[in-house]
Image (tube, rainbow, N blue to C red):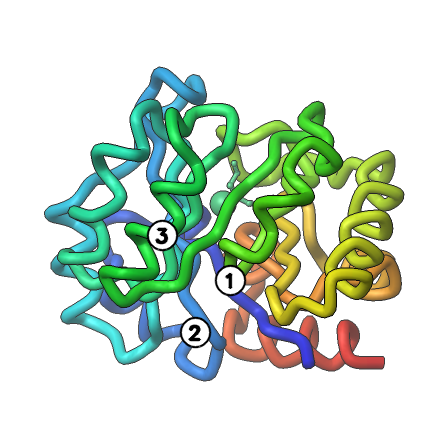
Amino acid sequence: MALINPSILSADFARLAEEAKAVEGADWLHVDVMDNHFVPNLTLGVPVVESLSKATDTPLDLHLMIEDPDRWAPQYIEAGAGSVTFHVEAAAAPVRLAREIRAKGARASMALKPATPIEPYEDLLPELDMLLIMTVEPGFGGQAFLDIMLPKIRRTRELISRHGLELWLQVDGGVSAATIERCAEAGADVFVAGSAVYGADDPAKAVRDLREKAET
Ligand code: DX5
Ligand code: ZN
């Protein structure tokens, strides 16, 4: 299985509904929420997510790059998110937060910045439906893929298997036709792609091509 989640961050924000439609056929639409505190960039918030969820049938994969996700995550679920990823570096109480996300009916996911190791969080894995390993420093689209993250992806996949868990392993940052096979080989199964999809002449075809590469 390989899930391809185009990131709306690389789309035209004045035409979000059309841009969402342009990638129908993708598994999830990845929505990057940035608050200019956790990361040095500012994107969109709850009202835009609410409108976007009405504008597309593709489920929304929210990536919260914000301070205080404990406070904000429930509002994004009410706005229509099907999956909510919080950063462990920002969460005050990650276990409580993951349980609350699940209780509200969304998939619970936790993200690790490149310098954050997985090992201290091994015991939290059963609380999660997905783990996101950042393959760039969060904040901007179009950055170069960090190859040094491949061992972390591999170690995380081993931990997931060792515990007999079902959770998805997502990678985000610099994922393209040139890097997706390395990620898949290391054990990732959910792939976020921003510039590689929205920078292509035919975004829907870019999604199909990425899926084919990830599945080979
Ligand atoms: C970056 C965001 C990513 C971004 C990826 O902090 O989390 O989702 O959109 O963009 P690309 O695929 O261009 O690296
Ligand atoms: Zn993201």
C-alpha distance separating marks 1 and 2: 24 Å
Judged by depth in the image, the label closer to the viewer, 3 or 2, is 3
x and y percent of residue 56 in the render? 25, 74
Q: Residue at x 71, y 57 (%)?
A: 176
Q: Which residue is mark 3?
A: 99
- Location of the C terminus (image quadrant): bottom right
Q: Which mark is residue 23?
A: 2
Name the side, left or right, on which 212 lies relative to 171. Answer: right
Can residue 189 be seen? Answer: yes
Front-lying residue, 55 or 91: 91
**Inter-mark Cα distance, 3 to 1:** 11 Å
Q: Callout 2: 10 Å neighbours few (<14), some, many (20+)?
A: many
Residue 111 image position (x, y, % from top left):
55, 41
Q: Secondary structure at mark 3?
A: helix
Q: Amino acid at mark 1?
A: Asp
The CB of the residue at mark 3 lies under 8 Å from ligand 2: no
For numbered disc 2, what is the local secondary structure?
loop
| Neighbourhood count class around disc 1 (C-alpha, 10 Å): few under 14, some 14–19, many 20 upward | many
- Whether the residues at callouts 3 and 1 have beta carbons within 8 Å, the answer is no
Residue underneath mark 1: 129
